[in-house]
Image: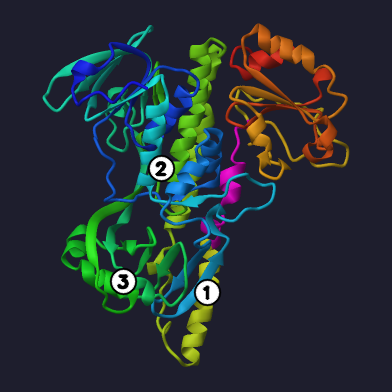
Amino acid sequence: MRPDPAASVAFLPSSVQVVVSGGGPVGLAAAVELGRRGVECLVVEPRVEVSHARPRCKTVNVRTMEHLRRWGIANRFRAEAPLPITWSQDIVFCTSLVGRELSRFTGVLGLVPEGDRFPEPGQQAPQYVLEELLREVVRELPSCTLATGLRVVGVEQDSDAVKVSVSDPAGDRAVVSAEYALGCDGGRSTVREQIGASYAGEHALRPNFGMVFHAPELWGHVRHGPAVHYWIVNDVAPAGMGPLDLEGTWWIIAFGVDADVGRRHPRALIDGAVGRPIDATILSDDPWTARMQLVDHLRSGRVFLAGDAAHLNPPFGGHGLNTGIGDAVDLGWKLGAVLDGWGGPGLLDSYELERRRVQQQVIQAATENNKTLSIELYAPHLEDDDETGVRARRMAHARIQETKDAEFHALDLVLDIGYEGSPLIVADETAGSPGVAPRVRPGVRLPHVWLEPGRSLYDQLGSGMALLLLDDRAESWTALESAARARRVPLTVVDLRSRGLRQRYGADCVLVRPDQHVAWCGDLRYVHPEALVDRVRGAASL
């Protein structure tokens, strides 16, 4: 790994294969995906250090953890997380931290293992923990350079290359030539502006006021036991809050509070949520308003957008960062394939076709979650000791369970969004057994199974395409292997014929993409191997 250049454009290379504008988690994830494939990658990031002032995303979901496992860093990330996964898997709704409990969700956010369903549970951790780890990983990759203290200020392209203009704090500029450029530079993306892409969608009308504060004594007052989130339902300080670590650092989002009010009365908001005055030191604040927006195009020629540069959604459900990581993975393996010579011309075209639908679904889900916050859940008499209070709390519990369960138990959304309809996905009507509904279908994330304790099927797939052999009838697989080899497509053959998984998956063979999505499944006797390989690598159609 070349060391980070000093904050001067004089140290930049004149050319690389890919320039990534933005070294937040999404840009760094793209660099990791590319760098692990040997792609020469330059990440340009204005911030020299990762700030801890704003934790932003606090839920790294199951799917992102699966990617971290694939990169070999899931355990490193968990070791750095301030809250161990055993801390809690609950979300509590209460009138205050010292007040009445109204409702509770258990097994939330994919934090609890579910047998074969996934190899890695989710993890609660501030975004900066993931970002710092990804910086370390990028620095460890020989083909990647992380250039901090610099900023992308312009992008021009022709049919052969992208010219990326970079400036340093002294005002000097340099131009780096690349085969492709990625805009992972957030909601104020320069790259998005340069390619003429615009957000379409809505702003929420109600402001929110976030804070991080330190209150070592607070745990001694919490009435409801450990939880990853506490939703405060009262008319004094309706909010969401939770611990960032075990040392007394907390986050809070006061709903319906603008920056002016929040900065004039921060302690009142904290005390109102806690339910009593406490000794607290405010470390930072972050006023924000939810946005539900998606750009009109994700690609212009050799330039692509990912993460917040491409889509914005409310944070409720924890989908924003994780969707961006999915963008980075999809784009990363496809760019790697094209630059390695085996990806066809249709491979990069599929990025927008596949990811836009995912982004739309996530925005829709997050927007729905945003409709019912603590303000909407409040009702009079929730603290009363008499029968009126009992009825009020019973009604509040019912409404909370009805309106918020989908937000906290969203694994179907996280794991089951697929790429059906993509030109890279091949349907096969011969897949499946009579009377058996197959667990696998083209386009979906490959259903996971443990081969033995601690040994995941995903660990056997390799970094390229993978072919799972599930039945003794899968004798014609060598023709597919030969077709892949002739086209330089990396293919790992995973022989599972002795494991009795044919019935479970409902197919003789399953062809899996580098991102663990199913490209095709069925019986190879009825498929032309060369045409199948060309289709899934974006070079032809069946």
Q: Quadrant of residue 484?
A: top right
Look at the numbered disc 2 and give the secondary structure of its residue: helix
Q: Residues within 10 Å of mark 3 (few under 14, many from 20)?
A: many
Spatial CA span between label 3 and label 2: 30 Å
Instruction: Reply above or below: 508 against 488.
Output: below
Q: Specify whether residue 418 is painted magenta.
A: yes
Asked whether the residues under the numbered discs 3 and 2 touch, taking CB atoms below 8 Å apart as contact, a structural biologist would say no
Q: Earlier in the sequence, mark 1 or mark 2?
A: 2
Q: Earlier in the sequence, mark 3 or mark 1?
A: 3
Q: Nearer the viewer, residue 2 or 207?
A: 2
What residue is drawn where x is 51% and y is 29%? 330
Question: Which kind of residue does numbered mark 2 sit on?
Answer: Leu
Q: Name the residue that disc number 1 marks.
A: 397
Instruction: Reply above or below: 131 against 265.
Output: above
Q: Nearer the viewer, residue 178 or 200?
A: 178
**Of marks 3 and 2, the one in the foreground:** 2
Tell whether 9 sits left or right of 24.
left
Spatial CA span between label 1 and label 2: 34 Å
Tell whether 431 sits left or right of 140.
right
Question: Which kind of residue does numbered mark 1 sit on?
Answer: His
Q: Quadrant of residue 239?
A: bottom left
Q: Name the residue that disc number 3 marks.
A: 237
What residue is drawn where x is 21% and y is 63%? 262
Q: Specify whether residue 245 is painted magenta.
A: no
Q: Earlier in the sequence, mark 3 or mark 2?
A: 2
Q: Which residues are magenta?
A: 405-420
Q: Name the residue that disc number 2 marks.
A: 130
What secondary structure prevails in the magenta region?
Answer: helix
Q: Residues within 10 Å of mark 2 (few under 14, many from 20)?
A: many
